[in-house]
Image (cartoon, grey):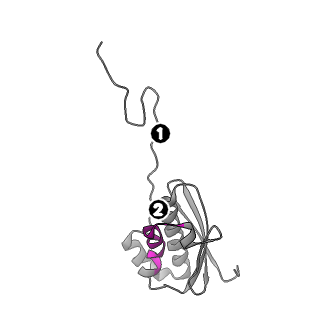
Amino acid sequence: MNLSTSTYATGRRRTAIARVWLTPGPGAILINRRDIDDYFGRATSKMVLRQPFEATEQVGKFDVHVNVCGGGLQGQAEAIRHGITRALMVVNPEFRPTLKRLGYVTRDPRKKERKKYGQRGARAKFQFSKR
């Protein structure tokens, strides 16, 4: 990976954080130094990663190197998609309207709600009995 020609971006989703480097190449995707097929078992997760490239017609033009941590596999896949989207916008700012329309630019801000004291969970209460 030649750092002088690579583009870096960070993607986030819940507790997953993905650091993404795009370099011109045949389209290889490495996640935590493993191939995409080894890292993600489900086809939907792989499809989520490729969505920004398909939307901007850049399939097979960039190699992707990702370092991702935190969250589950689905959250990591969406964090990687967010990072790829941001890196593509650095490469070519004209991609932004297309990616924004599809909802890939906006970070998903939802987080797990904390458990409150005096309750069984975030919203669930202990069972109430008058007697």
Residue 99 versus residue 40 in the image, above or below: below
Q: Secondary structure beneath disc 2?
A: loop
Tell me, for residue 114, which label it has, or none.
Answer: 1
Proximity of marks 2 and 1: CB atoms separated by less than 8 Å? no
Residue under the point 37% across and 34% down:
124
Occupied quadrant, residue 26: bottom right
Three-letter residue code for mark 1:
Arg
Q: Secondary structure beneath disc 1?
A: loop
Residue under the point 42% across and 29% down:
119
Q: Residue furthest top?
A: 131
Would you say the magenta stretch is mainly helix, strand or loop? Answer: helix
Occupied quadrant, residue 99: bottom left
The residues colored magenta run 40-53
The reply to whether residue 39 is in sight is: yes
Left/right placement of residue 38 relative to residue 116 reads right
Residue under the point 47% across and 80% down:
53
Q: Say whether residue 68 is magenta.
A: no
Residue 71 versus residue 103 in the image, above or below: above
Q: Position of residue 111 (x, y in %)?
A: 46, 49
Depth check, mark 2 against mark 1: the one in front is: 1
Q: Residue furthest left?
A: 130
Left/right placement of residue 87 relative to residue 56 reads right
Left/right placement of residue 20 relative to residue 51 reads right
**Could you tell which of marks 2 and 1 lies nearer the N-terminus?**
2
Comparing 126 with 109, the one in front is: 126
